[in-house]
Amino acid sequence: MKIALFSSKPYDQEYFEKYNIDYQFDFTFFETPLNPHTANLTKGFDAICTFVNDQLDAKTMSVLAENNIKLIAVRCAGFNNVDLEAAKAHDIKVTRVPAYSPEAIAEHALALILTLNRKTHKAYNRVREGNFSLNKLIGFNLSNKTIGVVGTGKIGAAFCKVLSGFGCEILAYDVYPSEALKEQGVKYVSVEELFKVSDIISLHCPLLESTKHIINKESLALMKDGVMIINTSRGALIDTAAVIEGLSQNKIGYLGIDVYEQEENLFYKDLSESIIHDDFILRLNSFPNVLITSHQAFFTKEAMFEITTTTLENIKAFKNGEELVNEVN
Ligand code: NAD
């Protein structure tokens, strides 16, 4: 079976080549992302393997159909970049990796919180330059703070578990509250209440019409002054312009983001010698209390193993005509 893997990075190739030994699929690794302009590269392949910023819209989908692609094996959990209606119309199956390591993302959210709060990134640079001053490095205890978790699926639940060790009060909002989390002491409240009383708000819901720009001018107005906002979910959960305004007015005390609305033009690329034509990211980077990582929350050895082996199993099930347990429809 011939598979074109898009948005390939050296670590993707390393993991897929290592574990493909047991499957013997014929992989070709394309560094380029998949979009309507690159879709023709799929000619001669049976299936494709894509990642978070590949553009699987109706246009791409019709080229895939012309090229006889029968399977899109998405190697991540989110599938907001896939036009499922178009895939269905062309009878192209879509599989994903629903849960590779929720702890990887939950732990990265914690890393953002602790780095922003205790300013270890600044302390590291200072000490290396012989500056041992503590001026402006003051943080706050997490103990007894109120943490608001929006979305308590696999990652949100793992995040609640991680945070419970810090002695925080954990509030949550989800359209489907979890009885198990309630038993562990998580208190479900309305999203408005969560915004009003939380010291730290962490987003773990998927990007849907109902969640797009859930952090906006109106929701920011409800929040405590100096609130910390963490987004490791999807960039468009945040209205970036509103957040920049909130940072300028000291409404937002700290912002930690692993995802960004326009990330497909920036993330996973080395642009250190380029002119960046994205005024929002440049403005965000200008704030001392903003920490941005380049969609790396998933990036642990454990998660890469799960992503690779589950994707290979998804392709194998398709090839053998078995039930596609991880099909998205
Ligand atoms: P999940 O499906 O297990 O959980 C999502 C939860 O959100 C569910 O409990 C659902 O009921 C809830 N939800 C749906 N609509 C909601 C709404 N309007 N308001 C509040 N909650 C709502 O998904 P998951 O595995 O926990 O992943 C969550 C998100 O994390 C994914 O959608 C993906 O976008 C993101 N993610 C990011 C990375 C990364 O590397 N940064 C990696 C994996 C996943």
Image (tube, rainbow, N blue to C red):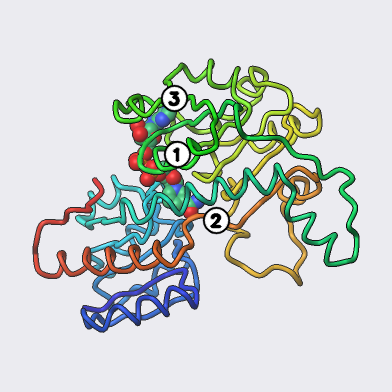
Q: Nearer the viewer, mark 1 or mark 2?
A: 2
Circle nearer the N terminus (2, 3): 3
In percent of the image, x 45 and y 26: which residue is there? 172
Q: Nearer the viewer, mark 2 or mark 3?
A: 3
Viewer-side residue, 291 vs 119: 119
Residue that label 3 marks: 173
Residue that label 1 marks: 207
Viewer-side residue, 222 vs 226: 226
The quarter holding residue 72 reads: bottom left
Where is 37 relative to 264, above or below? below
The x, y position of residue 100, in whole percent, is 35, 56
Q: Is mark 3 within 8 Å of ligand 1?
A: yes
**Callout 2 touching callout 3 (CB < 8 Å):** no
Give the distance between the C-alpha atoms of the residues marked 2 and 3, in whole angstroms. Answer: 24 Å
In percent of the image, x 82 and y 45: which residue is there? 137
Where is 161 relative to 101, above or below? above
- The kind of secondary structure element at disc 3 is strand
Give the distance between the C-alpha atoms of the residues marked 3 and 1, in whole angstroms. Answer: 15 Å
Viewer-side residue, 67 vs 77: 77
* Mark 3 residue crowding within 10 angstroms, few (<14) / some (14–19) / many (20+): many
The x, y position of residue 75, in whole percent, is 36, 61
The x, y position of residue 139, in whole percent, is 75, 39
Three-letter amino acid code at the position of disc 2: His
Q: Nearer the viewer, mark 3 or mark 1?
A: 3
Give the distance between the C-alpha atoms of the residues marked 1 and 2, in whole angstroms. Answer: 15 Å
- The kind of secondary structure element at disc 1 is loop
Residue that label 2 marks: 295
Where is 225 relative to 285, above or below? above
Three-letter amino acid code at the position of disc 1: Leu
* Mark 2 residue crowding within 10 angstroms, few (<14) / some (14–19) / many (20+): many
Three-letter amino acid code at the position of disc 3: Tyr
Quadrant where the N terminus sits is: bottom left
